[in-house]
Structure formats: C-alpha cells, structure tokens
Image (cartoon, rainbow, N blue to C red):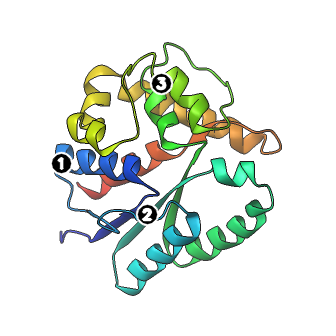
Amino acid sequence: MAKKSIAIIGEGETEWFYLESLRVAKRYPFQMKPTFPKHSDWRYIFKQALQCVAEKYDVVICLVDMDVMHSKPSEMPVYQKAKIKAEKAGIRVIETNPCTEFWFLLHFLPKLSSKTYTSYEEVVVDLRRYLPNYEKSKKYFKKIPLYQYLSAHGDLSRAVSYASQLLQLAQETPEDLHSYTQIHEMLEFLERLSK
C-alpha cells in the first residue's frame, strides 16, 4: 500500500510541537503544514488546509481551538459555515474547547470531570498540578517532547476514554458550554492510516 500524503495544520506552537513529537515517536509519514504556524486564527488554518487540498494531499486535518469562538459568539456562525465548506472539500476538522492543553490534562485526571474550562488560563492552572513547569514556549517544547512525555507519565487510554465521553456529552447538549476534544479521533485515524 502506498503511503498517503498527510497535512496537519494546527493553530500554534503547542500543536506543532505535540504533533511533531507524535510523528517522531510513531514514525508517521505526515508532514506539518505550514512547517511552523505563523497565525493563530481559524481563518488562516482553513485557508492553509484548502491550499493543501489544492496541492492534492491525500488527507488534510485542521486542529482548531474553540476558545476564541466561545469568547466572541458572533464568530461562531461564520466559523460553522467555513467548517462545513472545509469538510465538503474533504478536510477533517478536529476541535478542542477551549484549547489543546485540555487534551494534555485528560492524560492525568484521576477521574472523569465535566468541569467547563473557558480559556487556556483556566486549563493551565489544573495542568500545572501534573506538569508543574508547563509553559507555551519553544524552550519548554524543545526540552519536553509532549507526546512521549504524556504517554510515559500520563495515561493515553484514559485520556481517550475521557475525551470520548466528554465529546458525547458536548454533542448531546450543545446548548450548554462543555470542555471537549476530538484529538483522540485524530490519533485513532492516524493509527489506522499507518497500518
């Protein structure tokens, strides 16, 4: 079977370094697009993704943090319309509310919690209980390969289970604001592609 060309577009350094450590650990053949993100904005991400579709990538995935949409409700309808357009073009949109650090936190929680986080600042307070020196910086991410660290010191299968349950809750009651992530779905998809 021929290897697929896969582009994953994330919002910022956090996603880039997490996915790069995942790619190295699992020896996945995907590449990050752009090579290093310049803008943390869903519009830019979708524009990059559509460019990858035009470049004939087999798989295009976007990682989107939802905190901005929830903090500016007027953005949500515009985003939803753009998301539908992206999905119709064959792009997989992977959302996390509020931010990617919520996925990291799920690796460490001793039990499932439906606590709602509305911002990175709220998530990082709880995340630092398990990763005391966590910070969004190149220096930190270069020192700690995120995927490997989370897999070695946290519980990936528990994170996947929690993410699944919280995503279901968010889908069943969309009128309520819930913290959720779809990153586990992306990991499962990438694992299937690698076989």
Query: Which residue occupies the foreground of this view, 120 or 152?
Result: 120
Q: Is residue 75 left or right of residue 68?
A: right
- Residue of label 2: 61
Q: Which quadrant: the C terminus?
A: bottom left
| Discs 3, 2 touching: Cβ within 8 Å | no
Q: Are there few (<14), some (14-19), or many (20+) residues within 10 Å of tag 2? A: many
Mark closest to the chain's N terminus, 2 or 1: 1
User: Image point 70% across, 65% down: which residue?
Assistant: 80
Reading the chain from its start, which is encountered first: label 3 or label 1?
A: 1
Quarter the N terminus occupies: bottom left
Q: Amino acid at mark 3?
A: Leu
Mark 2 element type: strand
At x 50%, y 59%, the residue is: 40
Residue 74 is marked as: none
Q: Residue furthest bottom?
A: 54
Image x and y of residue 11, in percent: 47, 57
Note whether 122 is above or below 53 in the view shown: above
Residue 175 found in image quarter: top right
Q: Which residue is mark 3?
A: 127
- Number of the label disc, if any, that sits on residue 24: 1
